[in-house]
Every structure is written in C-alpha cells, then in structure tokens.
Amino acid sequence: MGRHRSDPMGIARLALAVLAVVGVVGLLVLGGRALITSFDTPQEPPEALRATAKASASVPVPTVHIVCAADTCPLVTVRVPGGDVLQYRDMTRGEEVSYFEPELDVVLTDASSVRVTANGEPRAPGEPGKREAFTVRDR
C-alpha cells in the first residue's frame, strides 16, 4: 500500500502546542513559588516598628494640608504669593493635598467643605457656602 509522509505543518503545530504548554506550566510554577514565599515572610520585630515610628515623627509638617470633607469641595485655590498657582480646582470627598512652601495664599470657595491644617494646627471650619481667603506662613 502507500507510504505515509510526515506533514511538516502538523509537526510545527505540535511543537508550538508543546512550547505553549511548557510556558504555561513554567508560569504557574513561578507564581506558586512567589505566593508560597510571600507567606513565609517573617513579621518585623517590635524594635523595627518603633524605629519606623520614630522616623515618621521627624517627617516635616506641611505649611498647609487640605482635606475635602464634602462630596464636592468647590474651587480650592493654593498659590505662592506673587508666584505659581499650585492648585486651582474642585476636590472630591477624601481627597487630600499638602504643600510645604514658606508662604501660601489659600482661597476656599466654600470654607465649610474642607478641613484645613496650617503648620500642623487645625483651622476652624468656615461657615457653609462662605468664601474664605487667608495666608499661611511656615514656622
């Protein structure tokens, strides 16, 4: 009867399929090892946590820190007097900004919608719907 010849395209397809399977298995093995290794990571000793707390205590205090406390805080402007405008936009609930310049002019379209901290000291919230403008100087 007739002789069977090898189909070169069939062999190429088989080789590609084998390579794909080997690649997927390799990725699964690497991912599994990474996951297992992450579970074996030891906890930091309390001394290291205390050192981290001390380091964060020496972090510089921003000249002004603003947190939006309403769903939308309309037009919050922060600028360097006579210089750059650092912020001129609405903010959304939970959004925070901090600036460290020596002197800043702040304008709040609705002073009750944000919580402002100047040099680490909280400022009293403004009246609902009232515009408030003030300057903060770094200590």
Image (cartoon, rainbow, N blue to C red):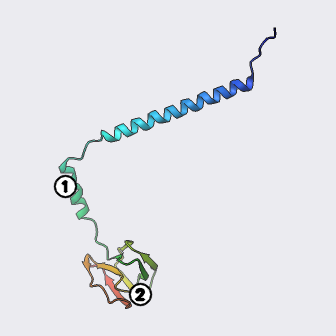
Quadrant into which the C terminus falls: bottom left
- Residue in the picture at 24% in, 45% down: 43
**Which residue, as the protein is rendered here, is positioned at the far right?**
1
Q: Which residue is under mark 2?
A: 109
For badge 2, the amino acid type reads Thr
Badge 1 element: helix
Please tell me which residue lies in front, 136 or 132.
Answer: 132
Residue 135 place in picture, x, y as percent: 34, 86
Residue 26 place in picture, x, y as percent: 49, 32
The 10 Å Cα crowd at callout 2, few under 14, some 14 to 19, many 20 or more, is many
Q: Which residue is under mark 1?
A: 50
Residue 28 vertical placement versus 45 (above, below): above
Q: Which mark is residue 16?
A: none
- Residue in the picture at 49% in, 36% down: 27
The 10 Å Cα crowd at callout 1, few under 14, some 14 to 19, many 20 or more, is few
Quadrant into which the N terminus falls: top right
The answer to which image quadrant residue 5 occupies is top right
